[in-house]
Image: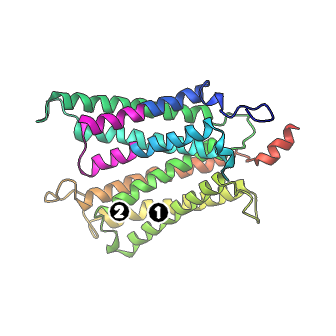
Amino acid sequence: MDSQGVSYLNKAALCSPLGAARIAQLAMGCAVIAMVTHSAGYSGSHGVFCMAAWCFCFAMSVAVFFLDATRLHSCLPVSWDNLTVTCAACATLMCVTASVVYPLFFVRSECPYAGCHVRDFRIAVTVCSILGTLAYGVEVVLCRARPGQIVVGYMSTVPGLLKVVQSFVACVIFGALANGSQYSLYAATIFCVVVYALCFALTALVVLMTVCKRTQGVRCMPFDRFVVVCTLLEVLLYLSASVVWPVFCFDTKYGSPWRPASCPQGKCPWDSKVVVAVFSWVNFCLYAADLMYSQGVCFVSPHAAARSRV
């Protein structure tokens, strides 16, 4: 306890619903990693992705829990509330993806050559991963801004959470582009790639400005207006890319509307093109929803919120 009578440890990090959710994240993450390394196993690019996602989320949970419990987050030049809800939303998306990919590629009804205990461990890994996903989702719900609240943490609002989802979907698009999508064949498809990269950069910029408390960095307009301007630009760009990409990939003049019979499973450029086309429209819808929600969000800086309470 310091000279002002404040405990060095934050009891709310343990004795609160948010603390319980973070402890559950740690428990499920530790269980998943232990079972995978012990007997469940993983292989190939899909297994590496799942293991990397679980390890990243577990390491992030450990760091967040430790900094919150020891109050050391006050020493960091970041907005702690914005950082934690961003991490929780990102971990939710990564864990839910791993919870789908791992059983899809590694869980079978029949016992593998290594024995039935391996299958049982893989089922247990899937269950614990789903429970971990729920724990991260609970943290997002607990931290989300409620209607009528003064919005201090932009990332806790619906537009802020949508920014995380948009970035995640963009990463899925980049992965498909890198998996033999043949985007360099036409100038129009190269334009689509530039659109995806530019929109991802703008979204990441908004998130970084919020987390790093640089919302006053835009001198010519308020931060909430800057966000709306960026979102409108992203909506227009994604609309153009969502129309152009399918035309130059699936029209008979440039490609094939049907999957070639000789295309190898898992390494087919046509499959990658479909993934890019589908997730382009997904991100367009997310940006459109973001634009609509952003109209009703008035961001208040922490200093202004403190003055309004005085």
Q: Looking at the image, tell me whether mark 2 or mark 1 is earlier in sequence order.
A: 2
Q: What percent of the width, then of the height, locates residue 250?
A: 30, 62
To which residue does mark 1 refer? 196
The local secondary structure at tag 2 comes to: helix
- Which residue is painted at 40% across and 57% down in the image? 173
Are circles 2 and 1 on residues that touch, CB within 8 Å? Answer: yes
Q: Residue 213 vs residue 63: left or right?
A: right
**Residue neighbourhood size for the residue with mark 2, other residues' Cα within 10 Å, grouped as few (<14), some (14–19), many (≥20):** some
Q: Colour scheme of this structure image?
A: rainbow
Q: What percent of the width, then of the height, locates residue 150?
A: 75, 39
To which residue does mark 2 refer? 177
Q: Residue 47 vs residue 91: left or right?
A: left
Q: Three-letter amino acid code at disc 2?
A: Leu
- Which residue is painted at 41% across and 65% down in the image? 244
* Rendered view: 221 above or below 254: above
Q: Three-letter amino acid code at disc 1?
A: Tyr
Picture quarter with the N terminus? top right
- Which residue is painted at 72% across and 42% down in the image? 151
Q: Which residues are magenta?
A: 28-54
**Residue 219 visible somewhere in the drawing:** yes
**Residue neighbourhood size for the residue with mark 1, other residues' Cα within 10 Å, grouped as few (<14), some (14–19), many (≥20):** many
Q: What percent of the width, then of the height, locates residue 176?
A: 34, 58
**Residue 157 visible somewhere in the drawing:** no
The answer to whether residue 46 is magenta is yes
